Image (cartoon, rainbow, N blue to C red):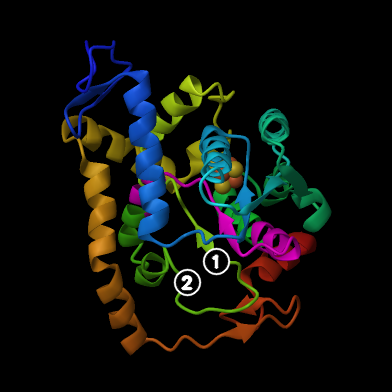
Amino acid sequence: MFCSHCKQDAIIYLPYSKTHLCEKHFKEMFDKRFRATIREFGMIKKGERIAIGVSGGKDSCVLLYSLAKLREVLPFEIVAITINEGIEGYRNKTLEFAKQECEKLGIEHHTFSYKKEVGMTLDEIMKKKGTEEIPCSYCGVMRRRLLNNAARDLNADKLALGHNLDDIAQTVFMNIMRNEPLRLARLNEPLVEDDKFVPRIRPLMRAPEKEIAIYALVNGIEIDFQECPYAKHAFRAHIREQLNETEEKYPGTKFKIVNSFFAIEKALRKGLQGEEKFEMKYCKQCKEPSANDVCVFCGMVEQLQAI
Ligand code: SF4
């Protein structure tokens, strides 16, 4: 097959736009969309310090690479943060990739661990909690806290995360299926602001997961296709499978879900703010912003220490 734009061999077919692309045109399309997303949401301003959450997986390594490249036309600072959850046989390998990619690009890199900050690894937490608990519920809360605090301590203006189009479409669906309108409303922007929260940006949110993997390969970014061993227990894994099946039959579905979310986002936020009171409190224990007297993070740690 030839590229839809030139006579070169195509390396990818995009069913949602019915186009074949060669390496050159694929890279151009990917970079253009990445930069357009940053512009559309005003994600990065000249001179800002951007912390990037780099797990060492394909999404975060491509994010790191693409942001480093963007600095050729928009001067800003980058610092990379890796969180080591302590997942035997999985995280050590991706940590190496994160370190290696940062070194290649000359980016300052800091690692934080659950063991040091929470007192136990995720594996230890799951041993305590037993198999009926969902690892991601603990991991998500803890990683969010560690990333935010690390970005704040490193004086970052924003925290960039590698969430892709698939992740966002899944999150929209999950929040609807769990009847979590508040979570949905704050997916892209917090409902309340606080100096202690580092604003999060997701420059890859319009990039499908498969295209990120191909972009990594054609740009020589080393990636590991191994998935977190706990991922299969998550509700997300089920939604992911369903959405992939639908995308296969009806190409463009994931783009449509994400675009629908952005079309209703404003109305949703406005509607909810009319009904709910967003009173920001501070956790009695850690003094971080919280909806309750004790934040979810401290509640979890306390519960784990009591077992
Ligand atoms: Fe943590 Fe779940 Fe992600 Fe694994 S899949 S790293 S347990 S959030």
Tell me which residue sits at (25%, 51%) in the image: 257
Query: Which quadrant: the N terminus?
Result: top left
User: Is residue 272 magenta-colored?
Assistant: no
Discs 2/1, front: 1
Residue 12, relative to residue 78: is it above or below?
A: above
Which quarter of the figure has residue 237? top left
Which element is circle 1 on? loop
Residue at the disc numbered 2: 190
**Can you see residue 207?**
no
Residue 92 lies left or right of residue 206; in this view the side is right
Query: Which quadrant: the C terminus?
Result: bottom right
Residue 287, relative to residue 88: is it above or below?
A: below
Where in the image, quadrant-wise, is ligand 1 located? Answer: top right
Q: Which residues are magenta?
A: 146-171
Q: List x then y, in percent, for residue 129.
A: 67, 51
- Name which residue type carries label 1: Pro
- Name which residue type carries label 2: Pro
Residue that extends furthest to the front in the rendered view of this protein: 73
Q: List x then y, in percent, for residue 114.
A: 75, 51
